[in-house]
Amino acid sequence: MGPEPFDLNFDGLKFWGLMKGRSQKIKTQFLSQRLIAGVGNIYADEALFLAGVDPATRSISRSRAVELLESIRSVLKGAIERGGTTFRDYRNLEGAGSNQKFLLCYGRHGEPCRNCGAMMLRKIVDARSTTWCSHCQKR
């Protein structure tokens, strides 16, 4: 299991160090939970979109790793504040979450990108549905 995303001792340089030398696609690294804990399919798509990183990318620069970690933290913080992402019957003690209303990327294939207007695309990355914008998310 990878480090907790909000661990104060875990910074962008350490995050980049965990990614260096890996041959897997970055989204696959997220889903394995070995790179960072708690980032599943929805939040991986959202963080990669915010950071402008193509989900099929296998390596990124140190500066992009720092930006990506900031994006992960931002996405998770927003989801926590909104009670999670509810598509079906998930509930917490306070009821259904509302984060699904704020998703910029996940599940929006075939719709216009909210950043640039290009069509959001869908591809399968290691057996997981992945939504991305080919204009905003570069390798």
Image (cartoon, rainbow, N blue to C red):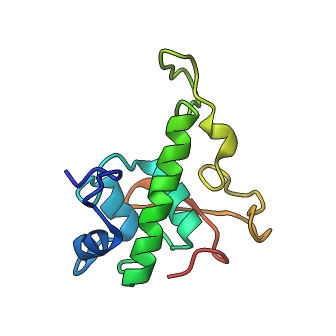
Q: Is residue 76 above or below residue 10?
A: above
Front one among 59 and 72: 72
Measured as percent of width and height from the top left, residue 31 is found at: 34, 54
Rendered image quadrant of residue 115: bottom right
Q: Is residue 81 left or right of residue 100?
A: left
Front one among 57 and 61: 61
Q: Residue at x 54, y 30 (%)?
A: 83
Front one among 70 and 27: 70
Q: Residue at x 35, y 70 (%)?
A: 12
Q: Is residue 135 above or below residue 70?
A: below
Q: Is residue 117 left or right of residue 12?
A: right
Q: Is residue 98 left or right of residue 62?
A: right
Q: Residue at x 47, y 71 (%)?
A: 67
Residue occupying the far left of the picture: 1
| Total numbered badges shown on the rendered structure | 0
Q: Is residue 70 above or below residue 92?
A: below
Q: Is residue 37 left or right of residue 124?
A: left
Q: Does any portion of residue 129 appear in the rendered image?
A: no
Measured as percent of width and height from the top left, residue 117 is found at: 80, 68
Q: Residue at x 67, y 56 (%)?
A: 109
Measured as percent of width and height from the top left, residue 55 is found at: 47, 68
Measured as percent of width and height from the top left, residue 133 is found at: 64, 69
Q: Does any portion of residue 101 appear in the rendered image?
A: yes
